[in-house]
Image (cartoon, helix red, strand yellow):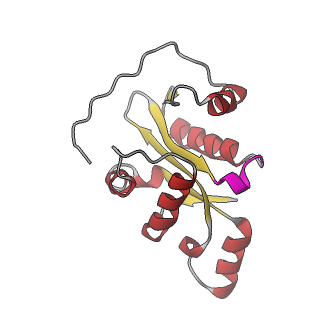
Amino acid sequence: MQIRSFAAADTEAVVALWEQCGLVRAWNDPRKDIARKLTVQPELFLVGVDDEAADRADLDGSSDAEATVIGTAMVGYDGHRGWINYLAVSPDHRGRGYGRAFMDEAERLLIALGCPKLNLQVREGNDSVIAFYEAIGYANDRTVSLGKRLIAD
């Protein structure tokens, strides 16, 4: 897998991946989430493309955006904490270390920005994802996450 910044041509493949991974919710329009991210630190919106498809695109002169998107990570830094959203790896490509590769790249980028701590949220009951994060060094901060919708999608 090759990790690169999101390109506009990736939109439909990214939305399809998020739907396949169960990340889309009725109250979050994924296309609006993408559009919003592209206004703030767009270079931190990462996609992973299949190496073989990327190599074929390079050989025939087509763009990387035509390669198969198999993963994503929406990374952000607000000057106090880093955040990860929409970490997704295609079910067909799991178990190959790609989730870890996204987290390594996110951490590298955030450290380069001077970010001292990375936060993320996992939906309650998503035990396999919690176990993934714990296995790579993340711990439950024993905090309560509160939210308020400001703009209805």
Q: Residue at x 40, y 22 (%)?
A: 145
**How many numbered badges does the structure rendering display?**
0
Horizontal side of 83 relative to 60 (left or right) equals left
Relative to 115, is 135 on the left or the right?
Answer: right
Residue in the foreground of this view, choosing between 39 and 66: 66
Most extreme residue toward the right, as rendered? 96
Q: For this view, does 11 lie left or right of residue 101?
A: left
Reply above or below: 9 against 30: below
Which residue is at the far bottom?
A: 60
Front residue of this view, candidates 24 and 113: 24
The segment highlighted magenta reads 90-95
Residue at 58%, 38% in the rendered image: 107
One can see residue 86 in this view: yes
Point out the image quarter for the N terminus. Answer: bottom right
Residue 123 place in picture, x, y as percent: 51, 30
Say which quarter of the image contains residue 87.
Answer: top right
Whether residue 89 appears in magenta in the rendering, the answer is no
Does residue 69 appear left or right of residue 137 in this picture?
left
